[in-house]
Image: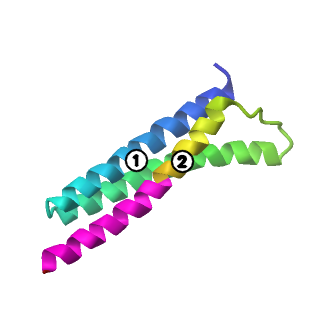
């Protein structure tokens, strides 16, 4: 397996796990478990950051003149990053909404 493939799989694995944490955080907030939800969001952020660092290495390599072949695997990795980031934002919004609903 080539270096770029390994990096893509690192990205996909890390941000996929982050996405799962964000979705689980919504479920915990729905049950009123806001501390658990916050912990899951933070765990997800840590995992997402790992994927982001792997992605940044690819960008740095290309910026230094090392050509990166655009593959379907790389596109998938970037798509997973974008969807995980979107789900994180939505999860944070849902958690805030569930907090407000609990107060009522």
* Residue at x 38%, y 52% (from the top left corner): 44
Residue position marked by numbered label 1 in the rendering: 19
Mark 2 secondary-structure assignment: helix
Expressed as whole percent of the image width and height from the top left, the position of residue 17 reads 39, 41
Expressed as whole percent of the image width and height from the top left, the position of residue 22 reads 35, 53
Which of the two residues, 7 or 103, is positioned nearer the viewer here? 103
Residue 4, compared with residue 26, is above or below; it is above
Which quarter of the rendered picture does the C terminus lie within? bottom left
Q: Which residues are magenta?
A: 85-103
Q: Is residue 64 left or right of residue 72?
A: right
* Residue at x 35%, y 58% (from the top left corner): 42
Residue 30, compared with residue 98, is above or below; it is above
Expressed as whole percent of the image width and height from the top left, the position of residue 89 reads 43, 63
* Residue at x 52%, y 43% (from the top left corner): 80
- Which mark is drawn over residue 81? 2
Q: Residue furthest top?
A: 1
């Amino acid at each position: 397996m080539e270096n770029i493939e390994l990096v893509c799989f690192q990205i996909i694995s890390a941000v996929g796990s982050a996405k799962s944490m964000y979705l689980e955080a919504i479920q915990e907030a729905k049950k009123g478990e806001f501390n658990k939800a916050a912990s899951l969001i933070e765990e997800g952020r840590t995992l997402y950051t790992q994927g982001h660092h792997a992605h940044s290495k690819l960008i740095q390599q290309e910026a230094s003149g090392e050509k990166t072949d655009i593959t379907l695997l790389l596109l998938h990795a970037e798509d997973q990053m974008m969807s995980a980031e979107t789900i994180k934002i939505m999860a944070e919004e849902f958690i805030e909404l569930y907090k407000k609903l609990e107060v009522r």
